[in-house]
Amino acid sequence: MKKLYIIAGERSGDLHGSNLVKSLLKRAPALSIRGFGGDEMQKAGTDIFVHYDRLAFMGFVSLLTNVRTIFKYIRLCKKDIVQFQPDAIILIDYGGFNRKIAKFGKEKGIKIFYYIPPKVWAWYQSRAFELKKNVDRLFVILPFEKKFFKEKCNWDVDYVGNPVLDAIKNFKKEPTFAEQNGLDRSRKIVALLPGSRKMELKRIVPLMAEVAKQNKDYQFVVAAVGNLNTSLYQELQHLPNVKFVEDASYDLLSVADAAIVTSGTATLETAIFKVPQVVVYKTGTFEYGIASSLVKVKFISLVNLIAGKEVVKELIQQDATLEEVDNELSRLLYDHSYRSAILTAYDSIYQTLDTGSASENAARLMLNYLS
């Protein structure tokens, strides 16, 4: 019986990891799968050793202040891998942690598969050579990544499609979602997606609250994350035109007229649901200074990166103000030619990504490489 050790360190990795595990077990039901992940991976059939909620740190400052905790879990992970003796380690995103495990696994002679690698094309590109050294097969999910690794370090990697598309294709819409949550379909519904990391919420929630206060005629709905403390949403909680839904962002996007989205996977999800959006992002001054000196790409949202041009407005740091967000939201809702241009670009992005199921493609290739 083949054994796989799988590591996902945050919520999106847990979702994509769960779909990968389902695809692996469908092809090879006798597989034994263990590792780091969350509730979705556990439901799919993974024996979870450590839950990702102990590891979800974001940003330079947060990482520095939690470095001892992170290294403790790296040590625990290495020890558990040695005891489990897997045939391969599957790493999902979570670059800082997983790159260390890749090096460790390679030294131990274990096959290393990396699904959804770190965004080394965005900054600190020399990490591409480190990945090539320590990873047996790399499975990328953005079309331009295959070209990047070939040109940067002469490495042929596998483009498997995008797992966000898988998740949305498998999504079953709740037909009475609007009614259940007291939403009036005759009024504008604006989805608020502030992210799933504590540091993101602390910066973005106050701005979203200002926008909601400014636009009392709109219905704002927050896509809240169930395992986060509700105090993180405090500024939004008692506003009369703001409602909350928990762990139901896809249902929310299926009824939204526009969205305010923190940069990340949610920008792509919003695009696939064909909801015009404005992307907002704020971080600490120190962290922003470091990031801006390192980043090698023109955009921060996956929508614009995949399109190779500005499809949606990105309001970053000092540009993420009430006035700017409010102006853009008004355009998204009422400028019909502007909305239409965004939706047309969304269609092109969808066609670029639609290469079959990413998790099915990755599972098939992984099992082939194992045998």
Image (cartoon, rainbow, N blue to C red):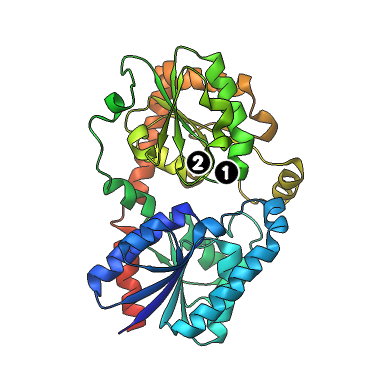
Q: Which x, y percent locates residue 362?
A: 35, 66
Residue highlighted by disc 2: 304
At label 1, counting other C-alpha atoms closer than 10 Å, the crowd grade (few under 14, some 14-19, many 20 or more) is some
- Specify whether residue 156 is in view: yes
Amino acid type, mark 1: Ile
Residue 300 marker: 1
Q: Foreground: 251 or 371?
A: 251
Relative to 104, does residue 247 appear above or below in the rendering? above
Q: As drawn, which residue projects farthest toward the top?
A: 217
Determine the image quadrant of residue 47. Answer: bottom left
- Inspect the image, locate mark 2, and give the three-letter code of the amino acid beneath it: Asn
- In the rendered structure, the answer to whether residue 25 lies left or right of residue 335 reads left
Percent coordinates x, y for residue 261 in the rendering: 50, 35
For image coordinates 51% across by 67% down, the residue present is: 150
The quarter of the picture where residue 262 lies is top right
Camera-near label (1 vs 2) is 1
- Where is residue 68 drawn, in percent x and y? 69, 65
Labels 1 & 2 near each other (Cβ < 8 A): yes
